[in-house]
Image (cartoon, helix red, strand yellow):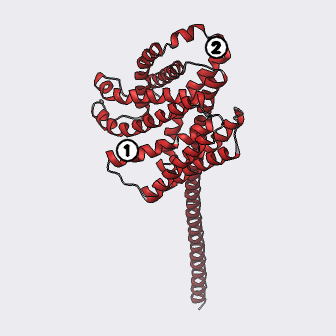
Amino acid sequence: MEDTSKVGRSGERGLKLHELNGSSFSMKSHENDEIDLEGGKLEKDRDKMARSNRVFKIQNQALLSGLAYCISSCSMILVNKLVLSSYDFNAGISLMLYQNLISVIIVSVLSFLGIISTEPLTWRLIKVWLPVNVIFVGMLITSMFSLKYINVAMVTVLKNVTNVITALGEMYLFSKHHESRVWAALFLMIISAISGGITDLSFHAVGYAWQIVNCFLTASYSLTLRRVMDTAKQVTRSGNLNEFSMVLLNNTLSVPLGIILIFVFNEVEYLSRTPLLRLPLFWLVITLSGFLGLAISFTSMWFLHQTGATTYSLVGSLNKIPLSIAGILLFKVPTSLENSASIFFGLLAGVFFARAKMQQRS
C-alpha cells in the first residue's frame, strides 16, 4: 500500500512538473510570438519611415530645384539688363560671345572630369545642328538688343507673343489642334501685349522691333529643334543626345558665328575705345552673367527631371510676375496705372495659358 501511494504521489508530482514545464513552454512561445509581432511592427514602422523620408527628399529636391531655376532665370535677365542699360554697354553680340565661351569652358571641364557625359562633336553632327544654331544665335542677339531699350516687365509680356507664333506653327507644321481654352489664353496675350505697348511710358520703337523679331526666332527655334533633334540622334555615336550635349553643341557653334557678327556689326572698334573693359567690377558682372546663363540650363534640366513638363511650364509663367516687379523697382521704370494693369493682365494670361496646356495634355 505504501509503495502504491508512493507511486501515486510521484505520478502526481511528475504530472505537475509536466504541467509546469508545458505552461512554461507555452509562456515562452507566447513571449516569442509577442517578440515576433513586435519585430513585425518595427519593420513596418521602419518601412513607413523610409517611405516618408523618400517622399520628403523628393519634395525637397523638387522645391530646391524649382527655387534654383527661378533665381537663376530672374537673375540672368536682371544682370543682362544691368550690363546693357545701366552700364550702357553697346556690344550685345560680344556679351553673348563671352557668356557662350564661359558655358563651353565649364561644360568641357565637367565632361573631362567625368561629372557629366557629352557626345563628341563630329562633322556630321555639326552639319545637322548648324541651322538650329543660327536661329539660336539670332534669338540670343535680338534678346540682348531688345532688353537694352525695353524695360524687363514689358519684355516678359511681349515674350508671350512667342506662344502665339509657336501655337500657329504647331498647327500648320505638325497638324496639332489646340483647345478653345488655349486659344482664349493666346488671345488674351495678344490683347495684353498691344495694350502694354500703347500704355508704355518708356516706349522705344527700335526695342519693340527687336523683340518682335526675337519672338519669331524663339518660336522658330522651338519648332525646328523638334525635327533636328531626331536627325541629330541618328548621327551620334550613342544614338542619343542629352541636354548637356545640346548645351555644349549650341554654345561651341555660336562662338565662330559670334566672332563673324562682331566684325559685321563693327563692335571691335567700340570694344577698343570703351572704358568699361578697364573696370574690374564690370568684368565681374559680365562673368556672373555667363555663369547664370549656364545655371539656367542646368537648373531647368534638374527641375524638369524632378517634376515634369507641366509643372515646369506653370512655374516658368509664374516666375515672370516677381521678375516684372523686380525689373520695375530696381531700374526705376516710369509706369502708369494703365500700363501696370496691362502688364499684370499679360502675366495672368501667361499663367492661364500654362494651365490650359496642362489640361490639354492630361
Q: Nearer the viewer, residue 152 or 128?
A: 152
Residue at the (61%, 24%) spot, across then down = 84
Q: Quadrant of residue 5?
A: bottom right
Residue for badge 2: 276
Q: Nearer the viewer, residue 96 or 263?
A: 263
Residue for badge 1: 169
* Label 2: how many Cα within 10 Å (few below 14, some 14–19, many 20+): some
From this viewpoint, is residue 217 visible?
yes
Residue 67 position in % (x across, y down): 61, 42
Q: Nearer the viewer, residue 62 or 30?
A: 62
Is label 2 in a helix, a strand or a loop? helix
Depicted 103 relative to depicted 198: above or below? above
Q: Quadrant of residue 4?
A: bottom right
Q: In the rendered structure, which amino acid carries the disc numbered 2?
A: Leu
Q: In the rendered structure, which amino acid carries the disc numbered 1?
A: Gly
Depicted 238 relative to depicted 325: above or below? above
- Quadrant the C terminus occupies: bottom left
Earlier along the polypeptide chain: callout 1 or callout 2?
1
On screen, residue 115 versus residue 327, left or right, reads: left
On screen, residue 143 versus residue 334, left or right, reads: left
Residue 79 position in % (x across, y down): 62, 28
